[in-house]
Amino acid sequence: MLDMFNAKSIAIIGASETKGKIGHDLMISLLSYYKGDIIPVNPRGGRMFDIPTYKSISEYGYVDLAVITIPAPLINNTVKECAELGIKSIIVISAGFKEIGEEGLKLESELIELATKYDIELVGPNCLGIMNTYNDMNASFASDISKKGKISFLTQSGAIMAAILDYADKRKIGFSRIISLGNKAVIDENDALADFVDEKNTKVIVAYLEGINDGSKFIESCRKASQKKPLLLIKAGKTTEGSAAVSSHTGTIAGTDAAYEAAFTKGGAIRVNALDEIMDYATAFSFSPLPKGNKIAIISNAGGPAIMTTDAAIKYGLEMAELSPSTRAKLIEGLPETASVKNPIDILGDASAERYEFALKNVVADPNVDGIIYLVTPQSVTDSIGIAEVAIKYSKQCGKPILCSFFGGTRFNEVETILSIHEIPNYLYPKRAIKSMKRLYDYYLIKNRIYPEAPKFDVDKEKIRKIFNEAKSKGNYTLGLESFDILKEYGIPTVGTGVATTVEEAEEVAEEIGYPLVMKILSPQISHKSDVGGIKLNLKNAEEVKIAYNDMMKRIPKIVPDVVLDGVQLQKMISDGTEVIIGMIKDPTFGPMLMFGLGGIYVEILKDVSFAIAPVNEIEVRDMIKNIKTFELLEGSRGDNPKDIKSISNIILRISQLVTDFPEIAEFEINPLMVFDDNDGALAVDMRLILEK
């Protein structure tokens, strides 16, 4: 854990009594609540805020935590001074490091060297600071300390930290620990996650990220954290610039954000797209038990909002619980005749607190119900306080999540305060309650997820390495159909094939394979053969093979100047089967990222694909395949036979091992893989592999 969160003495190096300076705000933040020793450091010395002030940290001596807010050029000497006093925890608030360019990068590199040499846990530079509400410590220049709560928050943006704190204060949401990482010179998101996981007052972890230092370590950190506590992440910057230089379908479709999405899934983190949503979900996790299923009941005093809430439940992946016969019988007996005892349960506009309690008491006891949306609208006779007290009573004892939506305005101001004091999640709009319930269920599945190891296949790696070395020795970093031996070595079935470099060889190979045939041009410079007329289909005899060969050799050099043609590949024509694509692009942060989707227009136009970070196990592959929108076409729709999904899964697992066995593979693609009916297997028809230079 990070020792700085429990500091009993803090020095502010750069303390000031001048309003508007960060050193002033830091002093005010600490003086307002902190019970430990506060040591202001300023070259003028004397007294500050009626506290003895020291001209240097050496004049005072050791402290548990030094917070530095002086000009960047002076900081490294100050850090060294702290280190020689044995100070192991330092926060550098000041900017002026790598974010400003080359000179700042040099300063930051020296800062990292110092921290490494003296084993210092250092937060920043260019950060807002840290906060531990259970230690009454606000070592930041945020406006005020948060109220105590069960959320711990890490952020790469100081401004986001300030905004979240202000938003949470308005909503009366509390925090346990907060850390602004800044430039992440030493302490990064992995260190913060490790601290929050072990911190006893933290029930849910929230993170705002702009980038990751170590992708593999981050996935491991997320996985460890998410097995103990829900982890909600916002990732800013959904750009595709990272794919601009790639040539495969996989790279073109992937983009930067797809890698983060896949990494979050692999790590068990829940991705959130907006700050208001992340606080909605964090509130639910802080105060609610997890549902053991996704079947919910809605109790409402208004039919229209109940119907809209039902629509939202279905849209976001929840199910409406089928109330048991005994529950329905009790509701019929105890509710007015005009009430609706189907789910949603409409207990009518004149519902009293007693009627709400009767309905809630019976519904929470129903074993078919996993969670309850408690919906209240401000009718003229609505006893909002009494109805809220019912929710408080049963939330504390029923063991199921009850998410409230007091759906109104000023008439519910007092109710909002009461529910907040008693730690009952309440949402202005029912849809937000529904989405929060779905996140609770998502985490129930994550927490109970099994993470088997990726399977290992027996492969002659030296044979593959020899193929790569031979290609690179010729300056060839793009391998295509001529390298089918790579697939064969990894146990991936390939279509009958042969290579020819003359028209006479083409005719001979054609006779060996048998007709009908497909002819494909071989050239490291041609990524998409069909674009240049480099594919000829359904060749039925030797004459057609001869014409096709001569046409390619004559016409393609006119289309692609200076092209190098290595001959053609002939393959047995496959007329049945479903085309799928399996690809890999090497992400700079997370490494090899696998892609799966249906071929043809589904990948070219619809971009209906799924991603996963390699290596993958059987469960991850199953999810990859099921997560494409057109999965039902593989299952067999409208009378069509189901396809051999087991073969697809097996081939993805083998490709996963290939791209992790050989990190020098930058891109890889089998397109198409022809998949036949269930138990009939699959065949790789075309492939492309690009090695890093």
Image: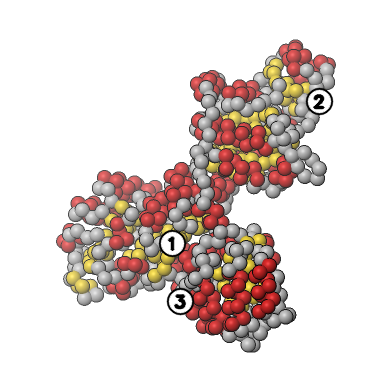
User: What is the secondary structure assignment of the residue under circle 1?
Assistant: loop
Q: Give the class, few, some or many, for how many residues have Cα within 10 Å of label 3's Cα (few <14, many ≥20).
A: few
User: What is the secondary structure assignment of the residue under circle 3?
Assistant: helix
Quarter holding residue 2: bottom left
Give percent across and percent down for residue 265.
Answer: 54, 49
Q: Give the class, few, some or many, for how many residues have Cα within 10 Å of label 1's Cα (few <14, many ≥20).
A: many
Task: Please name which of the two marks, 1 or 2, marks the residue nearer to the observer.
Answer: 1
Query: In the picture, which quadrant includes the N terminus?
Result: bottom left
Instruction: Compare marks 1 and 2 and give the one earlier in the sequence.
Output: 1
Work out whether 519 lies above or below 155: above
- For this orientation, the residue located farthest to the bottom is 380
Q: CA distance from mark 3 to mark 1?
A: 17 Å
Give percent across and percent down for residue 203.
Answer: 43, 62
| Circle 1: residue type | Lys
| Circle 2: residue type | Asn
Q: CA distance from mark 3 to mark 2?
A: 74 Å
Give percent across and percent down for residue 504.
Answer: 75, 12
Which of these two is toward me, 550 or 28?
Answer: 28
The dot on residue 421 is 3
Residue where numbered disc 1 is placed: 203
User: What is the secondary structure assignment of the residue under circle 2?
Assistant: strand
Work out whether 273 lies above or below 250: below
Q: Is residue 413 left or right of residue 121?
A: right
Instruction: Compare marks 3 and 2 and give the one earlier in the sequence.
Output: 3
- The residue under the point 60% across, 78% down is 358
Task: Please name which of the two marks, 3 or 2, marks the residue nearer to the observer.
Answer: 3
How many discs appear? 3
Residue where numbered disc 2 is placed: 538
Q: Are marks 3 and 1 in contact (CB under 8 Å)?
A: no
Q: Is residue 363 left or right of residue 458?
A: right
| Circle 3: residue type | Ile
